Image (spheres, grey):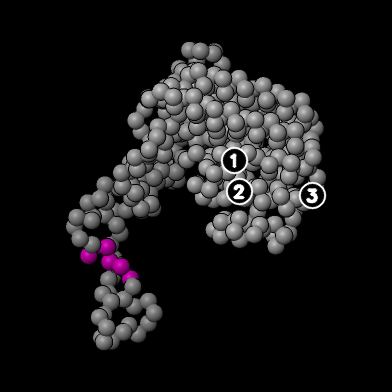
Amino acid sequence: MRLWSTCREITPEPEHLIHFLFAEGNVKVDRNTDNTESLLRGPDQLPPGCGLHLLPADGSPKPARAGDGLTPNFSCIHPSAKQLQIHHRTHSHLVFKEVCQPIYDLRRLDIVFKTRMDVQKALELSHSIGWVHCDIDTGNVLRWGERMGKLADLEYAKRMDSNTTAHAVRTKYLFQDPIGDPVKCPFRFNPLHDMESLWWISTWALYYHVDQQGGWPSSGQITESYKLFPGRLKARLHAFLAPLDYEVLPASFQSAGRLVEYMRREIKRAYTASEEELPPVYSNPLKRLQSTFTNHLTSILADSMDIRTFNSNAKRQQEDPMPDIRDPKQPKWDGSREPSNAGHQ
């Protein structure tokens, strides 16, 4: 991988910071590669033999049994539909050298933020060589035993000067509807987005947890949690622009919450400073932001030693905020995991 080789030019052992793939291989079944192509006959033909019964028009006799008229016969598909270039899926296994825990499984606040700090170092390395991760979430921020945090899942990593979107999918799969050409984003993914994603993880770690086993979040903490993670992009942007109410957190979390609020302000300043020129210039605002984050995280670590974190056990009917606060499509409170990816996307 290009990112790996470039990292090795800067530091001899980038694997200390990044969870790189160790080995991969396709699964064999009866000495054959296990893939979706084995389900088909010919390159694109679907299996024949299923008789088609056309559904009768209104007023005509209806099928005698519920299943009559519903069995497809793929041989009747229009010839142009048969020639679709389907990219088949292959069953494969990935092997990593270390066995790690995702950050959402950690149960000490100082370990959570130490892991968060280590992953920031990995991002600083990738940013220094012109790469952005594009997919920071709680499943990609890992803890390796008692040693360190690691950054994982480089699938969407790309160079900062790349014109591709972060999650562009340009192909069709057998069991997935084609999505067409990727949507053109109104902005180019940049390193400040990676840093903002880490901030959202810090916020989730505080507002979705309590400091006592079997503890209950305050009504203010629940309300603030749904403001921060409402399930709607525009609403999350508004939450990011507004100050955090860290006084609704458990008392042992409030010092960390105050510093996370300072970090939010610094992200806003970095965005503003980078956009003073067009196209935006990120280098100096990014360096200042990285330094500020490191200083605040060092203070958080000192203030949160041995503080335990627990998922809330509050009853569902007492967890839900008022209807005008919570998105009706938002799932019930569940402190087990942050919604995938950060709020800027």
State which quadrant residue 67 falls in: bottom left
Q: From the image, tell me which residue sits under label 2.
A: 227
Relative to 90, residue 193 above or below: above
Q: Residue furthest left?
A: 79
Q: Is residue 74 magenta?
A: yes
Residue 29, x across and y down, in percent: 45, 45
Residue 173, x across and y down, in percent: 35, 48
Q: Disc 3 marks which amino acid?
A: Gly
Q: Decide which of 246, 132 is in the foreground and name it.
A: 246
Residue at (48%, 19%) from the top-left corner?
Answer: 283
Marks 3 and 1, the one that precedes in the sequence: 3
Q: Decide which of 144, 224 is in the foreground and name it.
A: 224
Q: Decide which of 91, 83 is in the foreground and name it.
A: 83
Residue at (57%, 50%) from the top-left corner?
Answer: 230
**Is residue 125 visible to the viewer in this orientation of the structure?**
no
* Circle nearer the viewer, 3 or 1: 1
Q: Is residue 81 magenta?
A: no
The answer for how far apart the CA atoms under marks 3 and 2 are is 21 Å
Left or right: where 175 falls relative to 111: left
Marks 3 and 2, the one that precedes in the sequence: 3
Q: From the image, tell me which residue sits under label 3.
A: 215
Q: Which quadrant: the N terminus? A: top left
Q: Disc 2 marks which amino acid?
A: Lys
Q: Decide which of 236, 316 is in the foreground and name it.
A: 236
Tell me the number on the disc at residue 25: none
Q: Disc 1 marks which amino acid?
A: Ala
Q: From the image, tell me which residue sits under label 1.
A: 242
The answer for how far apart the CA atoms under marks 2 and 1 are is 10 Å
Residue at (79%, 37%) from the top-left corner?
Answer: 252
The answer for how far apart the CA atoms under marks 3 and 1 are is 27 Å
Magenta span covers which residues? 71-76
